[in-house]
Image (cartoon, rainbow, N blue to C red):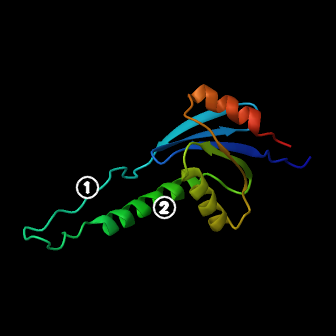
Amino acid sequence: MPSVKKLTTLGIWMDSRQAYLIESDGYEYQVEKLVSEVDESHLAGGTRSKTAYGPMDVSAEPQHNRRKQHQIEMYFDVLSKRANPKKLLLIFGPGQTKNAFEKSLNWEHGNQVRTKLMTTDKMTENQMIAFVKENITIN
């Protein structure tokens, strides 16, 4: 009798601060929390020159943006290692981070991962599990 490999599902509730990974084989659901290391701070504006009508000091905004972009890429890399073409993937949550993650995932895996993208508000773990049960079906 040939072995049949079950298709698993993975639901990811995510924002830029954290992600909850809800993995299921159709019967049991396991929830794992992953905290991102993305810096959410904002830079203050530049400072005025001591001379009248002098130039403003240069802020470190470009460096801050590059650092934040690198942190986001590392966050997406950790998440994308969990999503492979053998899984059905539901990405949901508030904000735009999920959209950027889906683009990153499609670029990395060449559109081989089957994804479904949905916008939701903040949820409890039980609400996340119920949401994944309602919105992903294993065929």
Q: At 60% across and 55% down in the image, what residue appears? A: 99
- Above or below residue 117? Residue 108 is below
Location of residue 21 (image quadrant) = top right
- Above or below residue 22? Residue 65 is below
Amino acid type of the residue tagged 2 in the rendering: Glu
Residue found at the far right of this picture? 1
Residue found at the far bottom of this picture? 54
Assign a secondary structure to mark 2.
Answer: helix
Q: CA distance from mark 1 to mark 2?
A: 24 Å
Dot 1 and dot 2 residues touching (CB under 8 Å): no
**Image-based side of 35 in relation to 134, left or right:** left
Q: At 68% across and 56% down in the image, what residue appears? A: 84
Residue 26 visible from this viewpoint = no
Q: At 65% across and 40% down in the image, what residue appears? A: 23
**Image-based side of 92 in relation to 72, left or right:** right
Q: Residues within 10 Å of mark 1 (few under 14, many from 20)?
A: few
Location of residue 132 (image quadrant) = top right
x and y percentages locating residue 75 in the rendered image? 48, 55
Which label is found at residue 73?
A: 2
x and y percentages locating residue 65 in the rendered image? 37, 64
Q: At 74% across and 62% down in the image, what residue appears? A: 112
Q: Nearer the viewer, residue 30 or 104?
A: 104
Assign a secondary structure to mark 1.
Answer: loop
x and y percentages locating residue 90 in the rendered image? 69, 45
Which label is found at residue 44?
A: 1
Which corner quadrant holds the C terminus? top right
Residue 17 visible from this viewpoint = yes
Quick one: label 1 or label 2, which is nearer the N terminus?
A: 1
Residue found at the far front of this picture? 53
